[in-house]
Image: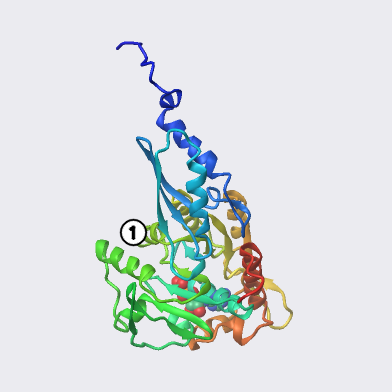
Amino acid sequence: MSSHQSPFQHPEDKVQPNSRQQQVVQILKQIIEPTVKNDIVSLGMVRNLRIVNDYVYLRFYIGSHQHQLQAEIESALSSLAWCKKTYIQLCTIPGIKTTLAVSSGKGGVGKSTTTVNIAAALRLQGAKVGLLDADVYGPNVPQMLGLGQADIQVIHTPAGDKFLPLEAQGIKVMSVGLLAEADRPLAWRGPVLHKIITQFLQDVEWGELDYLLIDLPPGTGDAQITIIQESPICGVILVTTPQQVAIADVRRNIHMFRQGGVPVLGIIENMSYLICGDCGSRTPIFGSGGGEQLAAELQAPLLGQIPIDARICQGGDIGSPIVMSDRTSPASQVFTQIAAALNTTFAWYSFG
Ligand code: ADP
């Protein structure tokens, strides 16, 4: 091959695709999200970045208050001499500022209980909250909030037909369980599952919400990956018990989120200890130190340790989350602190 270079070749043309990618990332890293005060790359808001010829393609995951950042990206990338145009595919849910996911490696560790109680604690602190129960394997959020099997209303909007969420304890609720017949397993697979989940993420008329909490199915399967790709999740909270087996599953779970570019906000250890009704001593029924060990290993903060409490279980059965029914209980205090930490992170001090 000739080593001759065309005199018309621009020095920028020699830039390899890989370093172009780095240039783009460097520029995007200078765009700061004003609420959380971190750059949009570190926050996991930019994903699927591709450069084809002289065009930049990316997916941008945003809340309803962050649309102005799109223009900032376009303007920042226009400074690249080789970049002819930037194509931005927005991933957002209309009306929702902050979308958070709650996940667990395995079932039965208290993921839905935690989601419901954090939603209730956020609501008590004045936030407008919605809860999307996407646990296709065990959708029990409606029961935990006292909702029976109800017909989902569909309304016609200019953007097409939308499901109307139900409301319980001031929290808007939509659940895959509300679509299914009671007591029947949800036997959705592959493309059907993907379609139903995508529809759930896009076709619910939530109105204006400060937070949407998504109760994910446990594990690392197709359903979880679809939700990670198709929803503007700002961060995920992982729930585990102190047992080693539960912890190994959370480890896999965390890797799935990090691979998908979703920040891990922290770990909640549930069923950490039993408080003796007589002397107040704490017994670690399922072992101890698991959550702390995991937090240190995976460099994710331990957000709280929830005791075993029969009232948590009863509250779930009768549709009355402990955070609302017994605000001073040790478990409620932990949920309340976690909600306050979320409010500090996402800076929703004043709710409109
Ligand atoms: P997951 O969503 O992980 O499958 P759930 O939230 O449905 O788990 O909880 C499983 C069961 O454990 C439920 O009956 C729930 O009431 C109970 N439970 C969860 N956390 C606690 C706790 N800290 N103390 C007592 N019972 C709990």
Residue density around tag 1, few if under 14, some if 14–19, many if 20 or more, within 10 Å: some
Task: Name which residue lies at 58% across and 79% down.
Answer: 123
Colour scheme in use:
rainbow
Q: Is residue 101 above or below residue 160?
A: above
Q: Nearer the viewer, residue 320 or 203?
A: 203
Residue 140 at least partly seen: no
**Residue 230, position in %: x, y?**
38, 60
* Quadrant in the rendering for residue 344: bottom right
Name the residue at the front extreme: 8
* Quadrant in the rendering for residue 341: bottom right
**Residue 287, position in %: x, y?**
59, 63
Task: Name which residue lies at 50% across and 46% down.
Answer: 75
Which residue lies under the disc numbered 1? Answer: 222
**Residue 72, position in %: x, y?**
52, 50
Q: Is residue 274 above or below residue 53?
A: below
Task: Name which residue lies at 57% across and 50% down.
Answer: 298
Q: Quadrant of the N terminus?
A: top left
Q: Quadrant of the C terminus?
A: bottom right
Q: Is mark 1 within 8 Å of ligand 1?
A: no
Q: Nearer the viewer, residue 214 or 64?
A: 64
Q: How many marks?
A: 1
Q: Amino acid at mark 1?
A: Asp
